Amino acid sequence: MNYHTISDLVADYLEGSLVRAAFFSTYSFEPDFFELEIMPLLMSRKSDQNRGTYQPALSTNDAIRWQQLERLMAQRHIDISVVYDPTVYRCERSPRLEVAYNGYSPRKGCQHAKLIAMVLESPDEESLNGGVLFGAGSFNLTRAGWWDNIECGHFVLLTSDWAPKNVCSEIIGALTFYQQVTTNSDTALQKVIEAIESLPKTADDDQLAFYFTTGERSFTDFIFDQGNYSQLEVISPYFAESGESRVIRDFLSQFESRRVFLPLDPYDDNRAKVAKDVYEQLSKQDVQWCGWRKKLTKTLVENDVPRALHAKVYRMSSATSVDLFIGSVNFSYKAFQDNVEAGFLIKQCGEARLLSDKAITAQSFDESRGELHGDVDDERSGFPVMNLSYCWKSHVLSLINSSSEWPHPIKLFNASKEELARIEWVNGESQPQVHVIQDCLEQHLKNSSLVTAASHDGEQQPISRELILSQQNVFARPSVLPPLSLTDLLSIFRGMSSSKMLQVTEHYARLSELASMYSSNEEFTDKLQAESRNFFSEFSEINSAFYHLNQTLCQAREDGDQLTLDYYLLGKQPDSLHGALQLLTVKTEPGKAIAPVIRYLSLISIQDTLQRVEPVDNELSNLVSTAIYDLEDSNTLQLTDCCDDPSYNRKFFAWFKREFLSSGSAEVKGDN
């Protein structure tokens, strides 16, 4: 067994690869930690030589970090989804990124499996190397699970050289289950399943078995299908709420030696973190309560501070072999037979004993807290589980799935109790009617993905639940960043490295967050405003940037890359064409205004680009044409630093469009 934080372990596996799609399942969930600390691990970029990868350097300021991650995902889209149990998740800060968040609570037990599945590809375009990284363990998508706790997991890399048929079949079965509970709408899951199915299958691996259950396959049956064992070691942080459990008793009866780790309070070694009833009942079943082997104790302490135990490990041995199970299964009857659980059994691993030979006891005990580990009531009641998604491109709010129809209208509110939307099932219709207060909902989603759903139960009592509302096509969401300087905008159009782009994003994120409290960075000042206003020198600067942008868009159209086309043509980000138009038309202080001739050249370059790519949506074209018309009508355009004849200027601009731009047929006011 190797000991890392889960974060370090995943980073090691991803080194040298690019992530194309990723799926996670969890019990406890902290969405802000997931986006700010786990998702950066997936954002590797190709090195300049395209033969390696590097991890982009991100700001430690969370507000800036979110904007940088959003920009990285716009540069290279990754389908990402999470399935979590909404009855236990904690959300201190709203998630912001484009992730499919799917709540799922089974009618019996809970969603307790912790899985990771990622489609990987090589940064070398000529290489066929790639595969699927798949892991199962005890780690929730929380700070404690990925950084602080003692956790355990097992990972496999499925490739064209190693994809055991037995392992792949069980993994696909688990992922297909999650695909079904998300109503087959999860793109990330679909890509993972397709990637595994496309791999040539190799012979069964007799040393490895994957376990996944939705409650119909007991953990006891799975273990004893693997072999005859005589000795058992159990490491589990949580136990059943009651010591009277036939399921646990039957499991223990199969072993001659039963040794169970006794989780003690790290600051009071006389106090056990287990209920007294459970302790006494298991002791009566000849369970020997033990601590760690001495050589493991130092490994599991960090900076002389003990870490909380959350790993779930079962070591089974016989005279001829030692097998190890690593997964999400606590030592409780709920985990053994009711919950959605997962893990790997590594056979004949030769793992040394984990627990000491010396038995230990406790003088005091904790109260049972089943909600911490999935030992919850059988019958669910209250608000139905709902998964909602808002598409910024189509401006449609969708109910992805719901655990059941609901007899009463469900209203969505923001933190100020303002109504955002109403969902209502009508008799005879399979899908509910969704009524949206568009302006209120979009203003809210610009800053937060959290909404409160409220309704009434069968007894007309008010009930409510906080929901994560997934957001799609966030490139079309109004940006929280201020407009770029024209220099930075044109530099982005020419093509900017990821590292430079992150520096620019950090600069504007600081302006957005701290406004006038933060002094401008000279590196990002608008140099064009201070340069000579000679018409053709200005055109050279602008034309170079739009030449590269046009190449990017034409290549995207040829490749069928709709994401890139949508980002620039429909997006509301500062470096989209909508963002460029805002920069060129917004009113600013006199000393900071962009010179009219620069504005004019930029606007007709945008118009030229739109005519080249022929967008379906004419809204942007109309806005650009209006801005050009207004500027031509203002008599502020000058060809030189001297006073020009307005009629001559109009004729010159008409000639200029005909000669240099594909939009030469566009009408110029006053050119009769």
Image: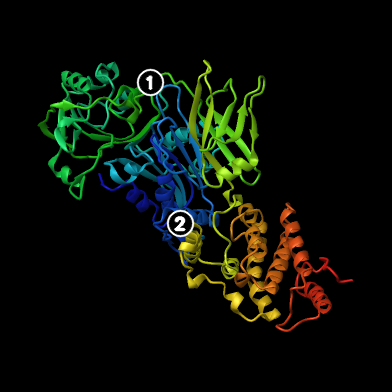
Which residue occupies the foreground of this view, 274 or 355? 274
- Asked whether, in this view, residue 14 is left or right of residue 241, the answer is right
* Percent position of residue 179, x then y: 52, 34
Look at the image and tell me whether residue 555 can be seen.
no
Image quarter of residue 143: top left
Q: Residue at x 64, y 32 (%)?
A: 434
Q: Residue at x 59, y 78 (%)?
A: 530
In the picture, which quadrant includes the C terminus? Answer: bottom right
* Percent position of residue 450, x then y: 50, 39
Which residue occupies the foreground of this view, 66 or 243? 66
Q: Amino acid at mark 1?
A: Asp
- The crowding category of the residue bearing disc 2, from other C-alpha atoms within 10 Å (few below 14, some 14 to 19, many at least 20), is many
Image quarter of residue 343: top left
Does dot 1 land on a helix, a strand or a loop?
loop
Residue found at the very far left of the displayed protein: 358
Q: Which residue is mark 1?
A: 377
Q: Residue at x 29, y 24 (%)?
A: 332
* Percent position of residue 507, x then y: 48, 64
Q: Which residue is mark 2?
A: 64
Q: CA distance from mark 1 to mark 2?
A: 42 Å
